Amino acid sequence: MTDKKPIVWVAQEARNVDYSDAERFGEVHFMTADEFKPLANSHLNPGIIEAIDRAAAAFDPRTDSLVLTGNPVVIGYVFHKVRDKADCGFNILSWDKMRGCYNSFVFTF
């Protein structure tokens, strides 16, 4: 048994999103805040990929959750990295606009 507290991993921090309700599911950590650039020679992209790789390596599919906000390229890469770690599924938090809260569901495959 482990005493590890759940972590809510946010793919990319968005300025206009209030993530405080996600704290019901664990401590909120942001994988990146930077915007992925669609330029092959961007000096920012390798750092973004490295930050996501580090965070994904720490993601525990048994206890942690994922919030998919941000740039579609970042979201796709985060999902791919987390999916590779999980045997059969992992927890995703989805924002419910009508209720103003996050709902948790297990993405299974």
Image: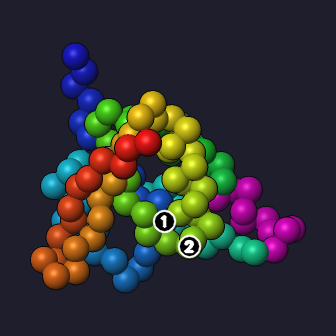
Question: Disc 2 residue type?
Answer: Asn
The amino acid beneath tag 1 is Gln
Measured as percent of width and height from the top left, residue 98 is found at 16, 82
Q: Earlier in the sequence, mark 1 or mark 2?
A: 1
When the figure is inspected, residue 88 is found, relative to residue 1, above or below; the finding is below
The residue at 79%/65% (across/down) is 43
Name the magenta segment's main secondary structure: loop
User: For the residues carrying marks 1 and 2, which lies nearer the camera in this image?
Assistant: 2
**Magenta part of the chain:** 39-48
- In this image, 56 relative to 35: left or right? left
Q: x, y (%) of residue 44? A: 72, 65
Residue 49: image quadrant is bottom right
- Find residue 90 and name its label: none
Is residue 100 visible in the rendered structure shown here?
A: yes
Q: Which residue is mark 2?
A: 71
**Residue at 22% across / 25% down in the picture?**
3
Instruction: Out of 106 and 95, give the one closest to the viewer.
Output: 106
> Which picture quadrant has residue 42?
bottom right
Asked whether the residues under the numbered discs 1 and 2 touch, taking CB atoms below 8 Å apart as contact, a structural biologist would say: yes
Residue visible at 57% across and 71% down?
A: 72
90 w.r.t. 29: above or below: above
Up-down: is 103 above or below 16?
Answer: above
Residue found 27% across the figure and 70% down from its top: 95
Local packing at callout 1 (Cα closer than 10 Å; few below 14, some 14-19, many 20+) is many
Look at mark 1 in the image and give the residue it sits on: 12
